[in-house]
Image: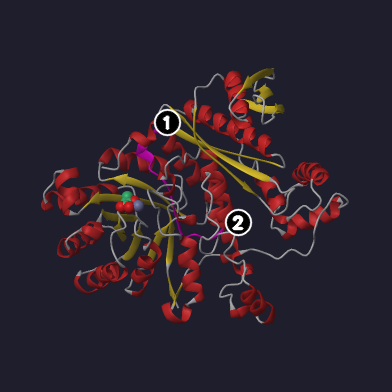
Amino acid sequence: MRKIYIFDTTLRDGEQSPGVNLNTQEKVEIALQLERLAVDRIEAGFPAASPGDLAAVNAVARAVKNSTIIGLSRSREQDIDAAWEALKDAEDPCLHLFLASSPIHRKYKLRMEKHQVLETAEAAIKYASRYFSKIEFSPEDAGRTELDFLCEVTEMAIRAGATVVNIPDTVGYLTPSEFGNIFKTLKQQVPGIEKIQLSAHCHDDLGMATANALAAVLNGADQIEGTINGIGERAGNTALEEVAMALETRQDFFQAKTGLVLSEIARTSRLVSKLTGMVVPGNKAIVGANAFAHESGIHQDGMLKEKTTYEIISPETIGLKESKLVLGKHSGRHAFREKLVDLGYELNEEGVNAAFAKFKDLADKKKEVTDEDIRALLEEKIVSTPEMFALETIQVSYGNQSVPTATVRIRTLDGQTLDEVAIGNGSVDAIYKAIDKVTKEEVELDDYSIKSVSHGKDALGEVHVVLKQNGLSMKGRGISTDILEASAKAYIHAVNRLIDKRSNQTANRNNVSLI
Ligand code: KIV
Ligand code: ZN
């Protein structure tokens, strides 16, 4: 069975999703989970974008031991120097160099002739070889590049010392047969192609990213690039969980396999969704909440008789276990600890105690505490943004004939408690105005969404908000059995993250263009 290498760019291309801003701790947390998933290569960021990005890539490079760590770089010496600075501590560092090759990019963006593209890229690969023994080269917008020129670029990259040549369909324009044909042609026509690995990097603008990646596999690609949950610029990138499960489920057809630990897929998806604030749609393939739900009577009947009638993947394969142990307010520490083990959490004594206290609190408000509730509680604060502000109490007065009024009590990092009251055109608006009075941050609420974590009237509510301030947008998340409290927590979480981002002086990263 041919091995397909998995290159995860959740922390780089994924982080280019509008409104996603991961801090260093969050990047490390995701990278460690990607390592547990056994991703071969992790693109941790774009070190030349800002000192904050460089520091984050360096933190990932130090933390991860079993995956190759990659930094993105334009074909410029300063970028390559910054990438080496960030990656030199990695067990297995790799540079990802790129330069656009398509006629549109050459004419309008680079203002370069073909020979200048070849010379610039060659010089950059040679310069990078001083530091790196592994170099991936990407002709950006390869999908819209003349095929004969793409062959020339690939040949140049191999001669100059690249170890991987990546073919990006940067704007998600190609169809599977066109994309597959590029790989077939490169394999047939480029001298020395057997010395390097060929990689596929697809975007999902026309909804064909996974199909295109799989077409590349069928035509000789050694590596697939993508992100968890398919997040990324515009419509996103290839969803890696889809590629992995397609190869696993249809081994008979593809004759190829990834080395991923498939049972870590669900947990990785949840972590990425939580830390990026990008909610996974219910009908998303593999990791959507409904991916294994059977609603119609005919399907349910079939499932009861024989699961394979309507199920081509078992939920256990991606790490979704069916729970036998239901917890409630009478459950003790022992049962709770068993549940944690069952869900795959390894907590020390202190961690178990803190989690048990939260569980008891919730069990007082909720009859049955589900696995989803426990995950939500445990994952609420895996990564802590410094809490400049923390919600202590909240009180709301609402009547459909009166003006909604909210009072909040908020604790600051230096231990003060501040009370404020405000009116609004709804309860959430009043709460947010009261919080603004305390924080004195001028922010704009750009998005607000609410969903329930589990089922039933007493389910935990999860609120996501996006706040904007001076061109920087930041997501926040809050959970509670009460949606107004969840709303307040999400808002304060986003404010804390905005302040943290500002103080790390990385707010300028989005201004650095990929040219
Ligand atoms: O989509 C793209 O072209 C990229 C490159 C930087 C490889 O992300
Ligand atoms: Zn991309």
- Dot 1: within a 10 Å radius of its alpha carbon, few (fewer than 14), some, or many (20 or more) residues? some
Q: Amino acid at mark 1?
A: Ala
Residue drawn at x 20%, y 49% is 105
- For residue 267, which numbered disc appears in the image? 2
How far apart marks 2 and 1 lie (CA) works out to 29 Å
Residue drawn at x 39%, y 59% is 225
| Magenta residues (range) | 37-51
**Residue nearer the viewer, 235 or 78:** 235
- Quadrant of image for the N terminus: bottom left
Is residue 406 at least partly visible in the picture? yes
**Residue nearer the viewer, 387 or 59:** 387
When the figure is inspected, residue 296 is found, relative to residue 413, above or below; the finding is: below
Secondary structure type for disc 1: helix
Is residue 88 at least partly visible in the picture? no
Residue drawn at x 67%, y 35% is 484
- Dot 2: within a 10 Å radius of its alpha carbon, few (fewer than 14), some, or many (20 or more) residues? some
Q: Amino acid at mark 2?
A: Arg
Would residue 176 be found to the left or right of residue 395 on screen? left
- For residue 507, which numbered disc appears in the image? 1
x and y percent of residue 308 in the render?
60, 79
